[in-house]
Image (spheres, rainbow, N blue to C red):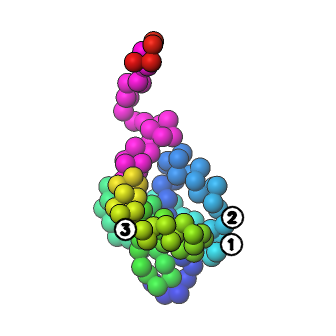
Amino acid sequence: MNESPSWVCYDADCSLCIRWVNRFRTSLEKHGFTLLPLQSPAVRAALHLPETELMAEMRVITPQGFVFGGADALVYLSSILCKPLFWLTRIPGVMPLLRRVYRYVARNRDCAGHTCKTCRPLLVRMKGGR
């Protein structure tokens, strides 16, 4: 990949992902990022990943061709958009925790957007706070 804008690649079928992309669109574009769905032919061609791996997490592709995924993509973005947040990720133990939380959210993002493909029982709180 030659010198081109950085890409932020997200799942365009995920309401949670779309909500976050729209929330940060102005700031990302101001810093030279192009927002592209993971489903787009350009992203598929750039990443050459199997479908399940492609859709597993958001990606950032830099002009130099580096690819960051998931929590590492968020950290890369924070290094450009919000230095104080980026420096917090340098605290020992933060990155493993951030990666774990990101994987959990990514696996359950359809549920967070209330579009689960599998029905999960709702947790009902018993009277009396139990």
As shown in the figure, which amino acid type bears the numbered disc 1?
Lys
Name the residue furthest bottom: 2
Task: Tell me the distance, in whole angstroms, between the alpha carbons under discs 1 and 2.
Answer: 6 Å
**Which of 31 and 119 lies nearest the eye of the viewer?**
31
Q: Residue at x 38, y 28 (%)?
A: 119
Which amino acid is tagged 2?
A: Thr
Element marked by disc 1: helix
User: Could you say where residue 107 lies in the image, as x and y percent from the top left?
Assistant: 37, 47
| Rendered location of residue 22, percent (x, y) | 63, 55
Which badge, 1 or 3, is on the more N-terminal residue? 1
Q: Is residue 56 visible?
A: no
Residue 108 on the magenta segment: yes
Q: CA distance from mark 1 to mark 3?
A: 31 Å
Q: Nearer the viewer, residue 99 or 35?
A: 99
Q: Residue at label 2? A: 26
Tag 2 and tag 3, C-beta contact below 8 Å: no
Q: Nearer the viewer, mark 2 or mark 3?
A: 3
Q: Are marks 1 and 2 in contact (CB under 8 Å)?
A: yes
Rendering quarter of residue 130: top left
Residue 114: image x %, image y %? 50, 35
Q: On the picture, is 32 further left or further right than 118?
A: right
Sequence-first tag of 2 and 3: 2
**Residue indicated by mark 3:** 92
Residue 63 at least partly seen: yes
Q: Nearer the viewer, residue 89 or 38?
A: 89
Judging by the rendered image, the residue that carries numbered circle 1 is 30
Magenta highlight on residue 12? no
Residue range in magenta is 103-126
Q: Residue at x 41, y 74 (%)?
A: 67
| Residue in view at x 54 percent, y 66 percent | 85
Label 1 neighbour load within 10 Å: few <14, some 14-19, many 20+ = few
Mark 2: few/some/many CA within 10 Å (<14, 14-19, 20+): few
